[in-house]
Amino acid sequence: MSDDRLERLQKAMAAAGVASRRASEELIAEGRVTVNGEVAELGRKVDPASDDIRVDGERINADPDKVYVLLNKPRGVVTTVDDPEGRPTVIDLVNLPMRLYPVGRLDLDTEGLLLLTNDGDLTHDLLHPSRQVPRTYVVLVPGPFKRSAVQELLDGVELDDGTARPTSVEVLEEQRNKALVQVVMTEGRKREVRRMFAAIGHPVERLARVAFGGVELGDLRQGNWRFLTQQEVGRLHAAVGGRRGAPRDKRVTRDERRERAVREQGEPS
């Protein structure tokens, strides 16, 4: 590793916005900072682009070149970098000079939380089926939504590409002939939630993703975006269960093709 990529740990922490240089030194001296799993010492040199730096066990993003964005995607916006049909894309909504890519994909009529980043390794890990990263959706369907329908979802719904099974189902609200249902999924198959609800006789009227990998949409208005906090980036790393990213299985060429597709267009989910 060349010295020009190395920085003093306290400088890297200050650049990441964790604390001032002096406060960072105090955190290090108190033994609250680790680098690649080892308690850090003052003056240690680190590579912000690759080293795992944590404060009180929570990973921080010390690499100024890595960008993480949360967008509240409106309906009618395409989750692609470029659209040959000239439709508005999620990239059009995020006015930043660096090249970002969607983490997964929301279809044209689905709204809500979409992550964008230039961190390809984290993107790969978040989308890899083996990581089982939770995605929370709120679904508006015709009601009433009976207990039997909840159980039918929890038991698993057979679709043409396999069984779809949420990890949790909760009826949030029922009014007249409408029901608002929250489901948590751990896959990102194409139009999976819509197909699942249609299969049990409750076609989706409106669908929004409200959380992904421990990051929540909150009160961010539609069409707006913001940078993720250090804490939220740490949650994403925690969601994939690895400090340097999940190992890639070179035998599974489909997953590699999937990653390349994500970087160009976003993965169906």
Image: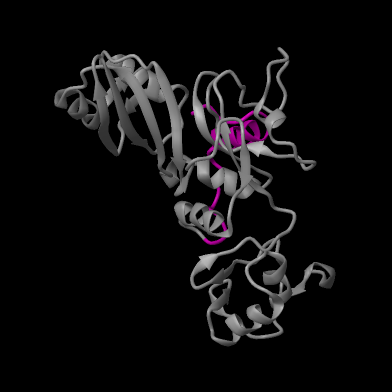
Q: Residue at x 56, y 55 (%)?
A: 233
Q: Does residue 254 appear anywhere in the picture? A: yes
**Corner quadrant of residue 206:** top left
From the viewer's perspective, is 5 left or right of 204?
A: right
Q: How is the image coloured?
A: one colour
Q: Is residue 101 above or below residue 231?
A: above
Where residue 126 sits: x, y (%)?
51, 45
Q: Residue at x 44, y 37 (%)?
A: 210
Where residue 17 sits: x, y (%)?
67, 65
The front one of 81 and 252 is 81
Q: Residue at x 77, y 71 (%)?
A: 6
The front one of 1 and 13 is 13
Where residue 111 sits: x, y (%)?
51, 27
From the viewer's perspective, is 43 left or right of 102?
A: right
Q: Which residues are magenta?
A: 243-269
Q: Residue at x 40, y 32 (%)?
A: 137
**Residue 209 on the magenta segment:** no
The front one of 165 and 151 is 151
**Corner quadrant of residue 83:** top right
